[in-house]
């Protein structure tokens, strides 16, 4: 069925007002405890009240690395869609779109209509969201090139599209950024002509002034900051240096070691702006996370999940879900100094996936070989990856899948950045309470709901880290469904799996009359055959003795 654009939930548990959508929601789960070698499972239920503000704000997005491939591509994409641009290519005329965006190109199923067909709506219609065409961009970059020049240097977009976008992007120029050579690859030094001078404390204050200036000059209600600049080296977590919010702020004042990305994170948090880390380094050190908790500001990370990482989380989920024992080798090339972080990310991804099958007898194995990434100038934005997945089959057999993936990285990352900004802003408008705890609260400042969009998703302390892609997507969808009082999407479709239709539904198949199927009569299958749905004849049910 063609996707509709608007829907209303008709339920006594859902109240629409001009200001809010308020929904009563029964959260059902299970608690498990071990007792004498037996697992005791107890179904539990908690009554939630979700309240979502309907007023959509004027939202600004500040990109650290605005002049890079990702930043210039995202800006160009929003402009191209806003201007409804089209351009000729060697395969025909293309039109601007948001393919790759969960919120803009994805759909969700609301249920079945009277004919038993699923009804879909755009993901963005579940709750009021900022329209991507209305976003306002600004940001920082160590290169002084304007956005039109940055777009041309990136060589991501077709020339015909670049020519149309040039006059709209030429006036956009990044603000000076923080440049600390020992944190990024040496090949970036030649383009570092647009930097913030001074001490770390002075740089922090300048970033905060930039955020305030952007918010004021553009007339914005909210600002969200995304790190999409170069990958930094791993930063050691040292007690007394960056392990607490107090120590981290003191470290900045004393000019001790702190990464540029952490400086931007701290500045954003202090200004009350959500910060999202799109690179693999450990930007959000414990001190930054504690500061976010103290200020009740959302943070999320790490590393945009594009290309082969999405494929990895799907394949590993498939292999483990099939009951196979998985050994996984993933190799790429990368400059020295950043390898440790990449290895940690790979281990986290694999362990998060293997935990799904641990109960079925799989055993943990360490990563076989390092994960490395290397920039090859010839291929430009076209990232190449080689992944190998080896699984142990029954009776000692093996199965190996080798996947070569070529993707245009920035065209995958840009819609992810878009979704991150829109979903983070939406979460800022959602509050909830329970019958046990009636005081309204928000989501935890570490916004783990965004895990679908990150390679190494951050989670609140003590929370499970989920890396399976479909579980991550279901989490986002089901939480948004809860906000409008809809049950979680469970894909059971029991009404289509019953021998006799017995579920209430509007339409010709609404109810089954008790007299339609009596003892000894044959069922009529949907395909017109007598017997079951596969056309087999059906024997009479055996007579049960009576007493």
Image: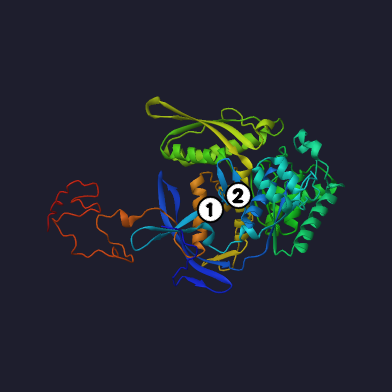
- Which label belongs to residue 262? none
What residue is shown with label 2? 415
Quadrant location of residue 143?
Answer: top right
Q: Is residue 376 visible?
A: no
For image coordinates 45% across by 33% down, the residue present is: 325
Nearer to me, 42 or 126 = 126
Residue 335, percent from left and from top: 70, 31
What residue is shown with label 1? 105
Residue 358, percent from left and from top: 46, 38
**Label 2: how many residues lie within 10 Å, few (<14), some (14-19) or many (20+)?**
many
**Label 1: how many residues lie within 10 Å, few (<14), some (14-19) or many (20+)?**
some
Residue 447 left/right relative to 393? right
The N terminus: image quadrant: bottom left
For image coordinates 60% across by 53% down, the residue present is: 419
Disc 2 on helix, strand or loop? helix
The C terminus: image quadrant: bottom left
Residue 159 left/right relative to 7? right
Residue 94 left/right relative to 494? right
Q: Earlier in the sequence, mark 1 or mark 2?
A: 1
Residue sitting farthest toward the top: 396
* Separation of marks 1 and 2 at Cα, in angstroms: 10 Å
Q: Do the residues under discs 1 and 2 have CB atoms within 8 angstroms?
A: yes
Residue 531, percent from left and from top: 19, 50
Residue 442, percent from left and from top: 60, 62
Question: Image height check: is 61 above or below 457?
Answer: below
Question: Image height check: is 318 above or below 63?
Answer: above
Nearer to me, 185 or 271 = 185
Residue 82 left/right relative to 178? left
């Amino acid at each position: 069925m063609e996707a509709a654009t608007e829907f209303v939930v008709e339920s006594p548990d859902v109240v629409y007002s001009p200001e809010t959508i308020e929904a009563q929601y029964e959260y059902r789960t299970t608690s498990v405890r071990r007792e004498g070698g037996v697992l005791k499972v107890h179904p539990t239920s908690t009554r939630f009240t979700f309240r979502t503000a309907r007023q959509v704000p004027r939202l600004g997005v500040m990109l650290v690395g605005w002049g890079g491939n990702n930043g210039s591509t995202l800006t160009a994409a929003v402009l191209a869609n806003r201007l409804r641009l089209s351009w000729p290519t060697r395969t025909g005329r293309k039109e601007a779109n948001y393919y790759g965006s969960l919120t803009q190109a994805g759909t969700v199923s609301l249920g079945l209509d009277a004919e038993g067909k699923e009804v879909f709506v755009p993901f963005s219609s579940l709750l009021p969201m900022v329209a991507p065409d209305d976003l306002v961009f600004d940001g920082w970059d160590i290169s002084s090139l304007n956005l039109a020049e940055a777009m041309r240097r990136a060589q991501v977009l077709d020339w015909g599209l670049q020519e149309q976008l040039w006059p709209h992007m030429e006036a956009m120029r990044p603000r000076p950024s923080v440049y600390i050579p020992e944190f990024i690859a040496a090949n970036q030094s030649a383009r570092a002509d647009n930097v913030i001078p001074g001490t770390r404390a002075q740089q922090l204050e300048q970033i905060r002034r930039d955020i305030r200036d952007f918010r004021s000059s553009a007339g914005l209600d909210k600002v969200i900051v995304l790190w999409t600049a170069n990958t930094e080296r791993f930063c050691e977590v040292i007690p007394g240096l960056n392990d607490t919010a107090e120590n981290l702020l003191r470290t900045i004042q004393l000019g001790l070691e702190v990464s540029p990305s952490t400086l931007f994170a701290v500045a954003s948090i202090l200004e009350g702006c959500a910060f999202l880390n799109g690179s693999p380094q450990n930007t959000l050190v414990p001190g930054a996370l504690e500061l976010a908790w103290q200020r009740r500001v959302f943070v999320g990370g790490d590393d945009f999940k594009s290309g082969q990482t999405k494929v990895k989380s799907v394949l590993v989920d498939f292999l483990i879900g099939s009951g196979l024992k998985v050994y996984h080798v993933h190799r790429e090339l990368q400059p020295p100094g950043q390898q440790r972080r990449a290895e940690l990310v790979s281990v986290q991804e694999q362990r998060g996936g293997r935990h799904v099958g641990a109960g079925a007898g799989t055993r943990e194995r360490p990563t076989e070989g390092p994960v490395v990434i290397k920039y090859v100038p010839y291929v430009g934005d076209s990232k190449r990856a080689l992944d190998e997945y080896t699984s142990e089959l029954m009776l000692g057999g093996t199965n190996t899948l080798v996947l070569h993936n070529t993707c245009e990285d920035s065209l995958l990352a840009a819609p992810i950045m878009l979704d991150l900004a829109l979903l983070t802003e939406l979460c800022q408008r959602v509050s909830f309470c329970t019958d046990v705890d009636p005081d309204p609260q928000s989501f935890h400042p570490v916004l783990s709901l965004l895990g679908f969009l990150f390679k190494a998703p951050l989670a609140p302390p003590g929370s499970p880290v989920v890396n399976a892609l479909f579980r991550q997507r279901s989490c986002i969808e089901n939480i948004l469904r809860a906000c409008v009082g809809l049950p979680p999407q469970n894909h059971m479709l029991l009404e289509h799996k019953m021998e006799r239709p017995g579920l209430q539904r509007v339409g010709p198949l609404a109810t089954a009359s008790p007299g339609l199927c009596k003892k000894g009569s044959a069922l009529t299958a949907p395909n017109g055959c007598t017997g079951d749905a596969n056309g087999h004849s059906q024997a009479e049910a055996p007579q049960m003795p009576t007493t």
